[in-house]
Image (spheres, rainbow, N blue to C red):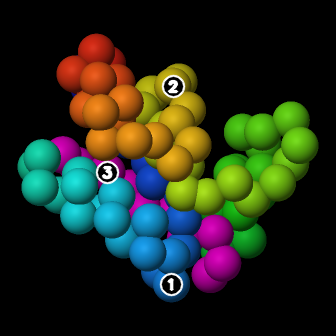
Amino acid sequence: MLPKIKLYGTNRCHKSTYYKNFLKDLNLKYEFLDVEECDENAEALRNLYDTKKLNFPTITIGEKKLRNPSDKDLKKWIETLL
């Protein structure tokens, strides 16, 4: 089974939109979790970091956490984990 991909971000964030399109272009299923419209999503994102800050965009692939990754790094982890 493939690890679940989650994208934590906001609809107003250009980088969040960029990653949505990036994942769609690769035909990958992912879950977008808006941290401004849903307190539960914001809390889940805060719990990923020791600082409890809303560090978005953040992408998780299974247990791997990527904070605002470069295209190269994101592709590498997708290929490694999927």
Quarter of the image where the N terminus is located: top left
Quarter of the image where the C terminus is located: top left
Residue 29: in magenta span: yes
Picture layout, residue 50 above or below residue 55: above
Distance between the Cα atoms at labels 1 and 2? 25 Å
Residue 33: in magenta span: yes
Q: Is residue 3 visible?
A: no
The residue at which mark 3 appears reads as: 30
Disc 1 marks a residue whose amino acid type is Arg
Disc 3 marks a residue whose amino acid type is Tyr
From this viewpoint, which residue is outermost toward the top?
A: 80
| Residue 21 sits in quarter | bottom left
The percent position of residue 57, horizontal first and vertical second, equals 54, 57
The residue at which mark 1 appears reads as: 12
Residue extent of the magenta highlight: 28-37
Front residue of this view, candidates 45 and 39: 45
The percent position of residue 47, horizontal first and vertical second, equals 78, 43
Front residue of this view, candidates 11 and 41: 11
Distance between the Cα atoms at labels 1 and 3? 18 Å
> Which badge, 1 or 3, is on the more N-terminal residue?
1
Secondary structure under badge 2? Answer: strand
Secondary structure under badge 3? Answer: loop
Mark 1 vs mark 3: give the one in front: 1
Q: Is residue 8 visible?
A: yes
Mark 2 vs mark 3: give the one in front: 2
Asked if the residues shown at circle 2 and circle 3 are in contact, with their CB atoms under 8 angstroms apart, the answer is no
Distance between the Cα atoms at labels 2 and 3? 14 Å
At 45% from the left and 54% from the top, the residue drawn is: 7
The main secondary structure of the magenta stretch is loop
Asked if the residues shown at circle 1 and circle 2 are in contact, with their CB atoms under 8 angstroms apart, the answer is no
The residue at which mark 2 appears reads as: 64
